[in-house]
Amino acid sequence: QKEVEQDPGPLSVPEGAIVSLNCTYSNSAFQYFMWYRQYSRKGPELLMYTYSSGNKEDGRFTAQVDKSSKYISLFIRDSQPSDSATYLCAMSATSGSARQLTFGSGTQLTVLP
Amino acid sequence: DSGVTQTPKHLITATGQRVTLRCSPRSGDLSVYWYQQSLDQGLQFLIQYYNGEERAKGNILERFSAQQFPDLHSELNLSSLELGDSALYFCASSVEGSSTADTQYFGPGTRLTVL
């Protein structure tokens, strides 16, 4: 079983829809949670960063973390065609002097105009 | 543009060969991370360097090695290449490698094709 599970999609929605992307994880040591967006043939770009449980909002994006359920979500409001990309969740734990990101497999999103 | 640069963009080589991928971190970043992205394995952490020293190792094969130079650029060396090594290789950098709160910024990647 992978440490981080993410529905690979693909997910296709009409412009203006609310998108919900989710990841579950098994390692209770994870404390830092991130969402990256990756356009085709490009490097991942950090979208959201949260620590421990709670919500964080940035414009049209909201990240939620529920550590008790080991479940994180990213919501995109008023989705735009430019949001079409692969979304990767990533997590890290407190591990002394080193940190590494563990990624989900990514969800491919297409927003149709 | 994240500020992280990687060269070359594309590499095509044959099995058994050796290649070197290069990464220049963002100005001021001391940590460099290498990741491999393949269709079947997703994005996987390979190795981290902080200010010239190896800090953490992930799923890096013995045929692969890396180093970080005094000017903080890093190189990933892949030898005895196999077909299964074909993937996107990303470099990321962050300001401080010992804090779990710092953000990693990714470069555009090097696409390696082994024929």
Image: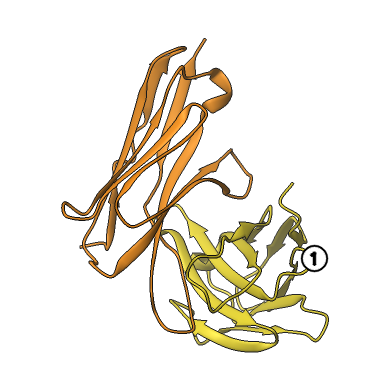
Extreme residue toward the right, this view:
B71
Q: Which chain is orange?
A: A
Residue B40 position (above or below residue B57): above
Residue B99's x, y, as percent?
Answer: 52, 74
Q: Chain of mark 1?
A: B
Helix, strand or loop for disc 1: loop
In which quadrant of the rendered view does residue B51 lie?
A: bottom right
Extreme residue toward the left, this view:
A69
Left or right of B35? Residue A28 is left
> Which residue is at a point 68% across and 85% down the rendered structure image?
B67
- How is the structure coloured here? by chain
Shade of chain B as shown in the rendered figure:
yellow
In which quadrant of the rendered view does residue B4 lie?
A: bottom right
Residue B3's x, y, as percent?
Answer: 76, 55
Residue B92 shows up from this direction: yes
Instruction: Name the residue that disc number 1 marks.
Output: B27
Which class describes the residues within 10 Å of circle 1: few (<14), some (14-19), or many (20+)? few
On the rendered image, what quadrant is the N terminus of chain A found in?
Answer: bottom left
> Which residue is at a point 57% across and 49% down the rendered structure image?
A44
Left or right of A113? Residue B115 is right
Residue A15's x, y, as percent?
Answer: 47, 12
Residue A29's x, y, as percent?
Answer: 28, 70
